[in-house]
Amino acid sequence: MSVAAVRTSDVASRPTVGIKRLAQSAVAVSVGLYAFALAVRLFVVGLVSFPLSEGSAYYIAVARNVATGRGLVIDAIWSYTTPPLTLPRPAFELWQPMASFVAALPMAFFGTTFNAAQFGGVVLGSLLAPLAWLVARDTARRLDLPEGRAWFVPLGAGLLSAIAGPFLLATAAPDSTLPFTVLGVAACAVMTLAVAGKRRGLVALGVLLGLAYLTRLEAAWLGLAFGVLVVAVRRDWRRLFTTVAPVAGIAALVAAPWWLRNLTVFGAAFPGQVADNVFLTRNEQIYAYADRPTLDGFLGQGLPQIAGTIATAMWHDLVNVLMVPAAPVVAVGLLTVAFAVIARRRSAASAPTSAPVWRGSLAALLLSGGITYLATSALFPVATLWGTFEHASGPLLVGLAVAAVVGGDAFVAWLVRVRGWQRSNAWMAPAALVALMLPIAMLQMGSAARQATATAATMNSLPAQVMGALHHAGVPHGSPIITDRPVWVADALLMPAIVLPDEPVDSVLDLAARFGAQAVVVFDRRGDYPAAMRSGPGAACFAEVTLSQNDAQAVASGASMVASFVIRPDCGT
């Protein structure tokens, strides 16, 4: 072989070698970020020893029943909207099952403990770091960043997603937030391929949207964002059907078994309580028994009240859900998006061009997150105050984290030019954002740990203290308990529990007669309860069970004092 031929062969092989090294580097960084996120999550889950909310307790209780062979049932009724109202209750008349499946899998191997349930979230949630890195790498490539900056921007996004407080909380107190975030970010990461009509992108997006739907109903807004991007990028309405239809069909195939299950169990494929949640005028109506929310009641508030409620919801979702838990990321991310939009308009006015970054996965995250924010705030302005947007905000937070690192990197690059620095200092923006987010995450986890400890102290004392007093008062073990925390009580007492409605005493007595309940246990104030059971109309039907001083102190070691009542036989059952 001639020297020229050898040189030609060597040159031809260099791109292949470069691609291999790039792929190996990408795999190494992804694995490293996953390992780091895994280590962080393994540490923080040890701080939280009890579910922080009834929602989290619900998913874990169902997961435990799945792992032990009982199936998709729960021994608590938290809503009276969807029949059949039986105990045990078919699970997920409104919520979706994926979070319970994630928790049930490790329970099958490690036992049905809370720590086992958390482990599923640890393994799944750690994927957020490499997924955020993937989105940021795509963004850096579209922005044509120099090599050093193109390396630090994705790394910073991955590290932020690994330590962000909202994601750590969602891992420690598992619910639908974490799996929806992972699936939503993964869907946005492949959305670019799907928008371009690539077959593998269409299939992957359809599967991911179907799985996201099995996690939260807000997957619909991910699908809407996909349709908007198809029209905006391809600029051809005829492409909308041929591109969106295959994705919708695949997603429907993934969700079809769940629809059939709901049709068999509840008589409807889709949750009917969604309409009730639209018509809420106050959150306590979620637990309504006789006085359910209606369209007339909702419209009867008047337009000013409705508009005010929506404005309150938008402020709550922006400030309490986004800004407070992740202020540095959200503030810098929103500023970056605002500047990018202004810059795009100016460039389009002078020389119309298509900005490739707005066709990427970051655009999909921000667009779908923005749609979710507006839809939940406007359509569910009351329910979102209790977490509707909070549990679906994860993809938007990841998008804002990526935008924040990109914006911080641009600011440092500007400083380099203005100050005449000899080095790019590309590490500064990611390091600063991580340094700002870390103490916030530590404060959040510390607060969560204290709350979990206090709640566990209260709930763990129930069997020995409250049930002993109720049994002494004649309440048999196994009869349902009416309570404002039905999921926690059912789990702690191993007794069926039904939710206490914020309605007159007559509704409570009707519930007692219908379900054979003989006792009421109240943790926190719900409407006029527990005061209405001590005085006023109907109070004669309730006899308060007094705990001994030591027992009362043991129960009250949590966040609230428990009030227990026996329903007199001639009033209830």
Image (cartoon, rainbow, N blue to C red):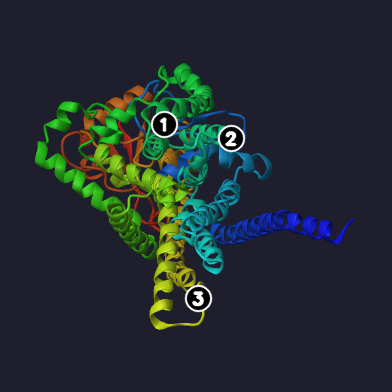
Q: Position of residue 328 (x, y in %)?
A: 38, 65
Q: Amino acid at mark 2?
A: Arg
Between disc 1 and disc 3, the foreground one is 3
Q: Amino acid at mark 1?
A: Pro
Q: Position of residue 98 (x, y in %)?
A: 52, 36
Between disc 2 and disc 1, the foreground one is 2
Q: Secondary structure at mark 3?
A: loop
Residue topped by disc 3: 424
Pointer 2 local density, CA inside 10 Å: few below 14, some 14–19, many at least 20: few
- Residue 480, numbered label: 1
Question: In the picture shown, does residue 191 fall above or below 437?
Answer: above
Q: Position of residue 84 (x, y in %)?
A: 40, 20
- The residue at 10%/37% (across/down) is 303
- The reply to whether residue 569 is visible in this rendering is no
Pointer 1 local density, CA inside 10 Å: few below 14, some 14–19, many at least 20: many
Cβ atoms at labels 2 and 1 below 8 Å apart:
no
- The reply to whether residue 547 is visible in this rendering is yes
- The residue at 38%/79% (across/down) is 418
Total number of numbered discs in the rendering = 3
